[in-house]
Image (cartoon, rainbow, N blue to C red):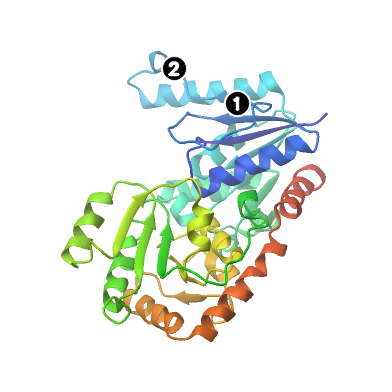
Amino acid sequence: MKRIALFINSLQKGGSERVMVNLAGYFHGQGYDVILITQYRRDEEYELSPKIRRIYSEPEPEELTKSRLKNFIIRFERLRNIWKQYKPDIILSFLGKNNLMAIATASFLPCRVAVSVRGEPTMEYDSRLMRLLAKLMFRFADGVILQTARAREFFPKAVRKKSVILKNPLNPAFVGRERLARRDNVIVAAGRLDDNKNHAMLIHAFSRIAGEYPEMRLVIYGEGELRGQLTQLIAEKRLEDRIELPGSIDDIAEAVGRARIFTLTSNTEGMPNSVIEAMVLGTPVIATDCPCGGPASLIENGENGILVPVGDAYALADAMRKILSDKELELKLGENAAKLSDELDPERVCAQWLEYLVKNL
């Protein structure tokens, strides 16, 4: 039985973490011996099947020193010892420094390593040194999994040759959901309340149309360090009775499926799960055209969604007006978006990942 090791920081709720949990469950269901290695355990993590072993690579606090170099060596040796002990046939790593560590610690061991960049490469590798290391070290990976064609352009030819674009499998919780004909007068967003998600842009845009559409409300689901700033901005706009920040909820599919518009206002994204999920529910989507090209690879502008420039609250407000003032357009966008469900069926997409890892590395 082949053993597949999956490596990521934690299982804290986020798009990449959810994809990894879904892949782990699928691989296990197909008869593979799956182990999942995370550095940490965090609060509010995705639930992992108890049949899948989970191992922690981060050393205990008492093992670490005041020297960054020594701590790096300790972490390096611990992860390499995990590979030696559990002897995976295939290692699949997600995100940033994890990818570099997976390549380095598995060198000269009898296993194949695939690394996956989950977003804009210049954001995952956000310094000159990290970008140089990624371009050099990815040459030694057995496989490179990217989200978009734009992300591939970041890498040199030697890396592009061994790279593949694999889409995210649809979250099973969104499969088979009934698309509602009647929807609430709500615009929704879902994501961490941080700088990159740029919910301030969404609040500014909504404030521009709030007077024209007094029946509409805006609800932003998620938690994060900018809750206080966003709450203050809502107060400054005097829209406390129209804009809600309810935090994270368990059944986000229910909320998104009842909304008239779903928005994504991120400065950068890979393949945004939240957009995928809104589209398969038949909810019209407005998304920023992020540099990595994730939303643009899903949305044909004006046909199954609307793309707006990053940071442009005026364009976002205009896109909201288009949808809210044109029922025919609203229905067309939703119906066309829902067709994505067949393309991203979780069984189909997870099978593509498995085939690449097992047959093509």
Amino acid at circle 2: Glu
Q: Is residue 187 above or below residue 19?
A: below
Q: Give coordinates of residue 311: x percent, y percent.
A: 35, 70
Residue in the picture at 37% in, 82% down:
318
Badge 1 or badge 2: first in the primary sequence: 1
Q: Is residue 85 above or below residue 106?
A: above
- Count every numbered label the image shows and give the total: 2
Q: Callout 1: 10 Å neighbours few (<14), some, many (20+)?
A: some
Residue 148 circle label: none
Eye-nearest disc, 1 or 2: 1
Q: Secondary structure at mark 1?
A: strand
Q: Is residue 197 visible?
A: no
Left or right for 306, reference 195: right
Q: Give coordinates of residue 283: x percent, y percent.
A: 53, 68
Amino acid at circle 1: Arg
Residue 54 circle label: 1
From the image, tell me which residue sits under label 2.
60
Q: CA distance from mark 1 to mark 2?
A: 16 Å
Residue in the picture at 82% in, 45% down:
359
Near-viewer residue (163 or 326): 326
Q: Secondary structure at mark 2?
A: loop
Q: Give coordinates of residue 116: x percent, y percent.
A: 60, 48
Q: Give coordinates of residue 191: x percent, y percent.
A: 42, 54
Q: Is residue 212 above or below residue 274?
A: below
Quarter occupied by the C terminus: top right
Near-viewer residue (338 or 139): 338
Quarter occupied by the N terminus: top right
Q: Is residue 320 above or below residue 58?
A: below
Left or right for 355, reference 240: right
Residue in the picture at 23% in, 55% down:
231
